[in-house]
Image: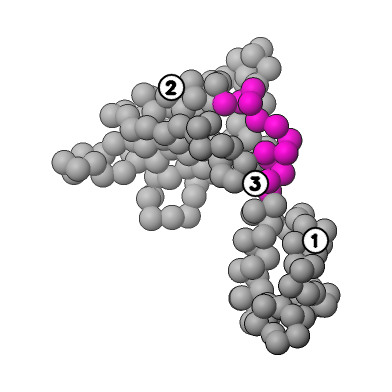
Amino acid sequence: MLPSSWDIYGPRWLRLNVGMTELTRRLLNNEHPESWGIFDGDVQVGGICAVRGTGGQMIWQWSCGFYPGCDKSQQTAGNADTYHEAKAAFQAAWERLRPQITPAMRDEWRKQQAWTAWKYTMWDTKCRMPTQSTTGRARCFCGTEITTAGIPEHVYAAHMENA
């Protein structure tokens, strides 16, 4: 069960004193009922979730880092027996990772989110991709004509805000 006072980041005065950007958590819609994404602004920088261990007991898994954006060597993850241990492990990992994050890393993650959202919207609206046409052209769900070569530019220019 998720603790009712679930605040990974400590009291607000502590966040302000250490100069840390305010992290937020969001309940994720996946197979784990207690799965929380941890966000720094609009970028998901990690997560903590409760899962069943090999013996059937509940364990807490945590991860810190994001892909694309972070190099694999910058990402860390682990298991903990209690929520408080997972919270402490995440916090320590975040303090190591945070100074290494650049705007370019965040943009890479945002572009991937925009690309994925665009692709699924194209599928959901039954729009064909340019790669599904012999001419290499198609019409985006927004009405713009696109080509295979022009997809990334169109997605990032017209649909980044929606991601």
What distance separates the C-alpha of mark 1 from that of mark 2?
Answer: 41 Å
Q: Amino acid at mark 2?
A: Ala
Q: In the visual, does 148 lie left or right of 51?
A: right
What distance separates the C-alpha of mark 3 from that of mark 2?
Answer: 25 Å
- Judged from the image, the secondary structure of the residue bearing numbered disc 3 is helix
Q: Residue furthest top?
A: 17
Q: In the visual, does 94 lie left or right of 147?
A: left
Where is residue 135 drawn, in percent x and y? 75, 85
- Judged from the image, the secondary structure of the residue bearing numbered disc 1 is helix
What residue is at 51 percent from the left and 42 percent from the top?
Answer: 37
Whichever of callouts 3 and 2 sits on the residue coming sooner in the sequence is 2
Q: Nearer the viewer, mark 3 or mark 1?
A: 1
For disc 2, the marked residue is: 88
Which segment did they paint magenta? Answer: 97-110
Residue contact between numbered discs 1 and 2, judged by CB atoms under 8 Å: no
Which image quarter holds the C terminus? bottom right
Whichever of callouts 1 and 2 sits on the residue coming sooner in the sequence is 2
Q: Nearer the viewer, mark 1 or mark 2?
A: 1
What residue is at 64 percent from the left and 53 percent from the top?
Answer: 112
For disc 1, the marked residue is: 153
Whichever of callouts 3 and 1 sits on the residue coming sooner in the sequence is 3
Tell me the number on the disc at residue 109.
3
Tell me the number on the disc at residue 55.
none
Q: Give above or below for 160 relative to 77.
A: below
Q: Amino acid at mark 1?
A: Glu
Q: Please name whichever residue, 12 or 100, is drawn nearer the observer in this view of the structure.
A: 100
